[in-house]
Amino acid sequence: MTKTAITELPTTTGPVFQPGDTGYDAEIAGFQTAYTHRPAVVVGAAHAEDVRAAVEYAARHGLPIAVQATGHGLSVATDGGVLITTRRLTDVKVDAEQRTARIGAGVQAGALIEAAAAHGLAPLNGSSLSVGVVGYILGGGMGILAREYGYAAEYVKAIEMVTADGRLRRLTPGDELFGAVLGTGGNFGVVTALELELLPITHVYGGQLQFDTPLVAPALEAWRLWTQDVPEQMTSAITMLTIPNIPQVPEHLRGKYTATINIAFTGTEEEGERLVAPLRAVGARMADDLRVMPYTDSHAIYRDPDSPHPYTATNALLSELPADATDAFLEATGPESPLPVVAGFRHLGGALGRRGPNGIAMDHRDAEYVARVIAMPGPDAEAIRDGLANIRKTLQPWEIGHNLNFLYGGGDQADEEQTKGGYSPETYERLASLKAKYDPTNLFRNNRNIRPN
């Protein structure tokens, strides 16, 4: 859609852009650089009323709506339509006595962690400081302490959002839309703010154990066996990759195929050291920085890249993780794989397997592990898509579904079947019915879409 195709624009306090305007490209840019939204109109919301005006405008013109804060989770890009950017909604208010925080839709994890830490509290954040908290929680929020505390979405106290009818609503537990919003990634409207429960956590024992090529397979096997007996207070993951041969990487690491075990434990240092002993027994480590750290340093557990870059990914939720599964996975993703990938497993179970009282839309609670595979997009998109599918096939005997929040990119594959794979049939039917009630024309469809029935 060209700039001249639209003669009326929404009236807002924040800026409004069309293609060709100065600032348009900067406004639509996000952390994901493989592709971007190309909307006909961009509304840079300065407050909730701007969001409401933008939704009313889109509904009046029959235009689909996309929403972006940091642009980490961009999955289905819009071509035309209206993009509402929420990055300016950055208010954080902590109520230390009630142990809650009210955050705007543009707040990043690092800002919330710092604000909470000033009061001896912490949120249930993920691995990256620059991820938008609202987008992370709308996808469920599988954080670094997930086995002990479950999904971050279980700790939402209130949701402020604009639905397709242009109404600004405040939802609390008990509202029929409350649980449906949490876990569906923006299918029901534009969230402008959340109220979250904070936890009295100030320190965590954790960090990384990194193993060189000869010990990758032994480290994976040791981690697999070790996870079968650890307490819920221990959340961990293992990631295998060939370190890029680029100047930003120290020369002695370039091109090495490594396994990194990520540890987060809320118990004592003494107990943490005792628990990780079987992992250290695998052999010499390229790195071993396990320690008690302030919670404000907990991003060091995963050290996610902080610079925008392209990526696409798939994942599989697994009922179990036998040696046959890890052997096949390692063969498919290792140095000889035709598709270079970052691949690994996160240990689930614990509190993730128990439903909270608010009926959030997170299913497959019997999953014990999630396998994740991330690739860099390239000129041969079909080869990358097939390569990821072939890797996932190695886990098919144990797969029970997937986590929609970890399906980065691949918007061309975001059909109804894929969306259904994130939920039980009963949950999907309930969500589709609510979609028909609150968004009957499917304005919010630039996502892993739930179609109104």
Image (cartoon, helix red, strand yellow):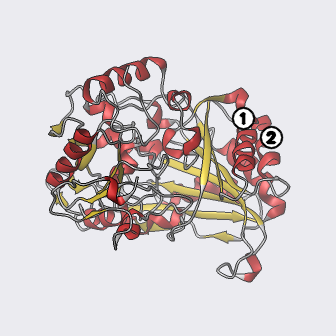
The answer to which of 30 and 330 lies nearer the viewer is 30
* Amino acid beneath label 2: Ala
Q: Give the label on residue 40, or none.
A: none
Q: Find disc 2 in the rendering and name its residue.
A: 328
Residue 162 versus residue 299 in the image, above or below: above
Mark 2, secondary structure of its residue = helix
Q: Quadrant of the C terminus?
A: top left
Q: Which mark is residue 395?
A: 1
Q: Position of residue 264 (x, y in %)?
A: 50, 56
Q: Are marks 1 and 2 in contact (CB under 8 Å)?
A: yes
Residue 442: x percent and y percent? 35, 32
Q: Position of residue 337 (x, y in %)?
A: 82, 52
Q: Amino acid at mark 1?
A: Leu
Residue 453 versus residue 281 in the image, above or below: above
Element under disc 1:
loop
The residue shown at (47%, 31%) is 353
Q: Is residue 86 left or right of residue 338?
A: left
In terms of sequence position, does the residue under pointer 1 or pointer 2 come before the other? Answer: 2
| Residue 171, placed above or below residue 274 | above
Q: Nearer the viewer, residue 132 or 385?
A: 385
Using a 10 Å C-alpha cutoff, classify the residue at mark 1 as few (fewer than 14 neighbours), some (14 to 19) or many (20 or more).
many
Q: Residue at x 37, y 24 (%)?
A: 452
